[in-house]
């Protein structure tokens, strides 16, 4: 299966797992906040509290770059798709497609620098890790944070002449466009932070970036500091290589598929509850170059009437995955917390095509 065809198929149906996988394992997310949480400023009504996170290094292990390999998916039951599949596919496909469309539609104003980044997510241009400068991508309501190793002079030279240096902060140099709704970018040797500004924004692109820089430096509150549900969700499910999170139902916007919903609890009693936070992550383990298991965690806090643990367990009782469910009261009054975790074991993967 060609990689471009894979992307199209993934958007059309989220039952697809990436191909030819090598080792992927979760970080110490159970009790620790994932490192990317430092880039998530506290919400103030001006920004969305959702996020997409993609570990780019993992894509080489997954076989996304390089030679074509068979595409794997959890095997369906005799009666249809496995009920637990969205718990794996939603964060995986949501973060991947979000990166592709976010880069593809958002970087044109950055000139040669935008082309450079776009080329680094193009499987037909990338042949080795040396072709890719960034190790992870984080989309937040305030902007995009890519971490890795960057040649500062090269990236600055790639910027169009419409960008000028406007400030320095914490090792970053901030550049801003000289237009009415300016885009902005902060460049350092270990990270890039950029943001487009639109007429709907109450903050400029530079102001969005400065919010992220303040959060990174600990000068401003972070989302996990502000919201106990976010802190719990990120600690519980945020330590994987592929993450989606939202205060509603996560979706990927900015394309013809912008109405595509990446909801890990689709078709369950949790699908339409009034979510205060939803964090979902997945990782894939392999053995001898073949998928051996997929692990996943979904942490959901909601304010609708409580749903019993047994009722949620019943919804996954015939799944091919081993599922564990825990339910507890949230720290906010009237909030219920639900944690669904599990694993697809070896033998539950099948090849879709070559």
Image (cartoon, rainbow, N blue to C red):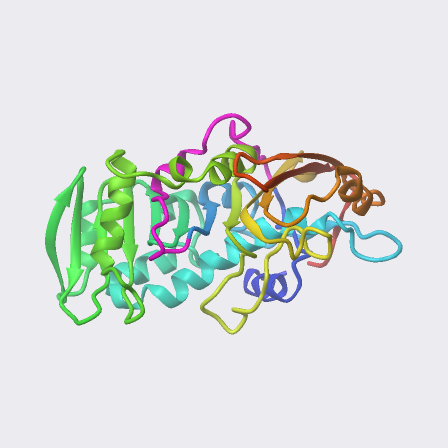
Residue in front for this viewpoint, 57 or 354: 57
> In the image, 206: left or right of 48?
left
Q: Position of residue 224 (x, y in %)?
A: 42, 37
Please tell me which residue is depicted at 56% across the width and 69% down the height of the picture: 259
Please tell me which residue is depicted at 34% across the width and 56% down the height of the picture: 117
Residue 173 lies in the magenta-colored region: no
Residue in front for this viewpoint, 139 or 7: 139
Q: Position of residue 292 (x, y in %)?
A: 70, 36
Extreme front residue here?
333
Residue in front for this viewpoint, 18 or 325: 325
Residue 168 visible, this orientation: yes
Q: Is residue 285 above or below residue 261?
A: above
Residue 282 visible, this orientation: no
> In the image, 245: left or right of 149?
right
Q: Is residue 228 above or below residue 117?
A: above
Magenta-highlighted residues: 22-48
- Main SS of the magenta part reads loop
State which quarter of the image contains the C terminus: bottom right
Image quadrant where residue 21 sits: top right
The total number of labels drawn is 0
State which quarter of the image contains the N terminus: bottom right
Residue 34 lies in the magenta-colored region: yes
């Amino acid at each position: 299966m060609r990689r471009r065809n894979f992307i199209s198929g993934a958007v059309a149906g989220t039952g697809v797992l990436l191909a030819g996988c090598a080792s992927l394992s979760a970080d110490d997310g159970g009790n620790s906040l994932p490192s990317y949480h430092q880039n998530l400023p506290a919400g103030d009504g001006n920004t969305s509290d959702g996020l997409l996170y993609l570990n780019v290094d993992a894509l080489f292990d997954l076989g996304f770059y390089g030679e074509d390999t068979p595409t794997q998916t959890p095997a369906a039951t005799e009666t249809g798709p496995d009920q637990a599949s969205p718990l794996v596919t939603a964060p995986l496909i949501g973060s991947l497609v979000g990166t592709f469309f976010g880069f593809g539609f958002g970087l044109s104003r950055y000139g040669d620098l935008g082309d450079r980044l776009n080329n680094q997510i193009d499987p037909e241009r990338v042949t080795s890790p040396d072709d890719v400068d960034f190790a992870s991508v984080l989309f937040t309501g305030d902007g995009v944070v890519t971490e890795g190793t960057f040649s500062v002079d090269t990236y600055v030279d790639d910027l169009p002449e419409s960008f000028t240096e406007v400030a320095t902060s914490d090792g970053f140099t901030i550049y801003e466009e000289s237009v009415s709704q300016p885009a902005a970018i902060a460049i350092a040797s270990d990270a890039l932070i950029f943001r487009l500004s639109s007429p709907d924004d109450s903050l400029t692109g530079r102001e969005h970036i400065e919010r992220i820089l303040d959060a990174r430096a600990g000068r401003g509150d972070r989302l996990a500091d502000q919201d106990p549900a976010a802190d719990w969700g990120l600690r519980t499910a945020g330590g994987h290589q592929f993450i989606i999170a939202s205060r509603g139902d996560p979706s990927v916007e900015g394309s013809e598929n912008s109405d595509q919903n990446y909801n890990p609890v689709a078709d369950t009693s949790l699908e339409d509850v009034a979510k205060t936070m939803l964090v979902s992550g997945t990782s894939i383990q392999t053995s001898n170059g073949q998928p051996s298991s997929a692990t996943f965690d979904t942490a959901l806090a909601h304010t609708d009437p409580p749903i019993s643990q047994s009722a949620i367990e019943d919804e996954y009782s015939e799944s091919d995955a081993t599922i564990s469910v825990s339910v507890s009261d949230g720290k906010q009054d009237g909030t219920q917390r639900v944690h669904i975790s599990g694993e697809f074991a070896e033998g539950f993967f099948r090849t879709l095509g070559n």
